[in-house]
Image (cartoon, coloured by chain):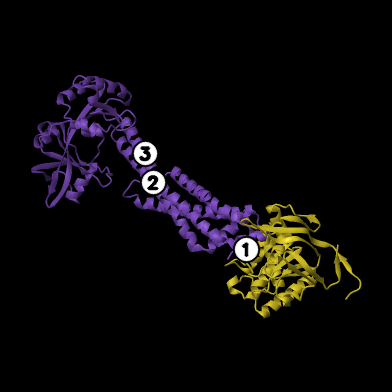
Chain colours: A yellow, B purple
Amino acid sequence: MAKTTETVKAILELKQVSKIYTLGQQLIPALNKLSLKVCEGDFVVIMGASGSGKSTLLQVASMLSQATEGEIYLKGKNVTEYDEVERARLRNKEIGFIFQQFNLLAKTSAVEQVELPLIYAKVAEEERRERAIEMLKKLGLGDRLANKPGELSGGQQQRVAIARALVNNPSIIFADEPTGNLDSKSGAEIKKILIKLNKEGKTIILVTHDPNVAKIAKRQILIKDGQIIKDVRTDGKKCH
Amino acid sequence: MSLNTFKVATRALLVNKSRTFLTTLGIIIGVFSVVMLTGLGSGLQAYVSDQFEGLGANTVFVSIGQVFDGEGSFNRGSVGQILSGNKFTLRDIERIKRLRDYVDEVTYFSTNVDEAEFSDNTTPVIILGTLANYPEAIDIDMASGRFFNVNEERSGEKVVVLGDGVAQELFDQIDPVSRKIRIGNQNYRVVGVAAKQGGGFGGPSVDDYVYVPYTLTSRIYQDTDITQFSVKIKSAEMIPEAITAIENELKRSFEEDEFSVFDQSQLLSTINNILSMLTVALGGIAAISLLVGGIGIMNIMLVSVSERTREIGLRKALGATPNEIMIQFLIEASLLSVFGGLIGLGLAYLGAWALQPIFPIKVTLTAVLLALGVSTAVGLIFGVAPARRAANLSPIEALRYE
């Protein structure tokens, strides 16, 4: 293990964050005063049994839902009180999503799928198309530009989704069981892409319960009852 | 933004073409019926106005009973008053004729129905027993031959002038003038054929008339009742004075409320009133189908929102604001209605064109603008509820939705 510790800037910070769901009269705490710092270039995997709060953590950290308590900082800015419109803009600009179900639009070509975030970023049509094509080529789908989801294999569909997540050049990629719906060969392919992206400097936060996937990350976090019970780093970096 | 949102909305509609078409069908039918039915109403109005203007601007009509009810409508009791047995006598008419300062001609007529026959052809006819001055009083042009003259009128000669329709039925290609025809059990000599007037809407039209001297019909049909007559006034400016003079003359034989004296403009405005109401009523009935079309759009949009919950969640995750989602669905709804409205309008124009030869249909710009405006508004109004539902979906719930 490296003796010298490299210090890197925190890109995402959760301070004492709680998320409590109300189910009728019952209060269900999904996150319980959880604190977490993610640094630029981190490859974090979040593991935990179902019901542990790992999905809630991903939703709160990715601005999809609002914390009940605590503060969230993105690139040093306090974004805790952002309203729905501000958070939509933030997701558009700073966050890329990769889902287990791919979540591609039916009857829509690969290029148009990848263009979606750019539409909401108000990028002009021509530039939008260029950037989408470029991103698809980068992911090895240069010959699949006009194909619709039904005409693509699972692995190809997930690669289209990854292109969509990357096209607006976000600060953090959130991936929720990205290989969960794929056979092992396609899964391995996706894992390779994620490793490559991280090497290029992308911050990745990945939720999974598959230990084989977890292995590829440089930092493993284990969640139980809405709290971090284990946080292991193998790259010797330190966040501040 | 708006152009992009517009494209997104158009795409969504094109993805599901058959459903898009079925949804617009309600609006298509709605706009089609509004434009067609108000077109029929307006056409009828224009046609009737035209016909009444043909009655002559200088003519004053005198009738038994109160024809108008004083509120711009016909008096429903007037038929009863006619049936009451009151009638004008030839003496009344003579007195009106003597108002020489105003009166040019007085003509009157009685009507009877009978069957006309020439060689093997027969046709039902309306027999108008009238005076030789009838064509001048009522503006009738002759297609061939002449109208019967004063001598024939006075002596009650068996001469007849045929309406264009009767001439066609009985004679087809042959020239009827100077031929003998049979009406009822009498033989008549045809002296002329009146020019085609058209109209009638499938009922009897003036083309189904035959004109016969009054003295003759009163003898044959034992019918001398005169419940109406027309007075041709020397000039249009004199009409108000003339009406007063005629009324004063008639008050000597009748109570004030037992007769009416009126001119074409009064008759026309009353008929126009009634036909405008008819047009509005027809449009109103058709508007109901437009409303139903709007509800159809709302229904489909609601289905579409719940079907596309995941898509909405994804769009939100990728950065769409609630407003952008709302506008997308509103544009979809209004595109459906505008598209439907335009097709409906096209069909209505086609329908109007096809009906033109048999029915006087008149598509007015007001009706067109109203139908398009209302259909667009319908799309927007009925699109709001589904669009709001879409906009308010939480992205997480939506993404989790199966």
Dividing the picture into quadrants, the one containing residue B104 is top left
- Where is A183 relative to A122, above or below? below
Taking the spot 39% from the left edge, 41% from the top edge, the residue there is B280
Marks 2/1 same chain: yes
Question: SS at mark 3?
Answer: helix
Extreme residue in the bottom direction: A185
Which residue bears the numbered disc 2? B285
Q: Quadrant of the C terminus of chain B?
A: bottom right
* Alpha-carbon span between mark 2 and mark 3: 12 Å
Q: List x then y, in percent, for residue A194.
A: 74, 72
Tag of residue B277: 3
Residue mark closest to the camera, 2 vs 3:
2
State which chain disc 1 sits on: B
Is residue A15 toward the left or the right of residue A98 in the image?
right
Question: SS at mark 2?
Answer: helix
| Mark with earlier residue (3, 1) | 3
Tag of residue B399: 1
Work out whether residue A128 or residue B264 is closer to the camera in this orientation and state it.
A128
Q: List x then y, in percent, for residue A231.
A: 80, 69
Callout 2 crowding tier (Cα within 10 Å): few <14, some 14–19, many ≥20: some
| Mark with earlier residue (2, 3) | 3
Is residue A26 toward the left or the right of residue A191 in the image?
left
Type of the residue with mark 3? Met
Question: SS at mark 1?
Answer: helix
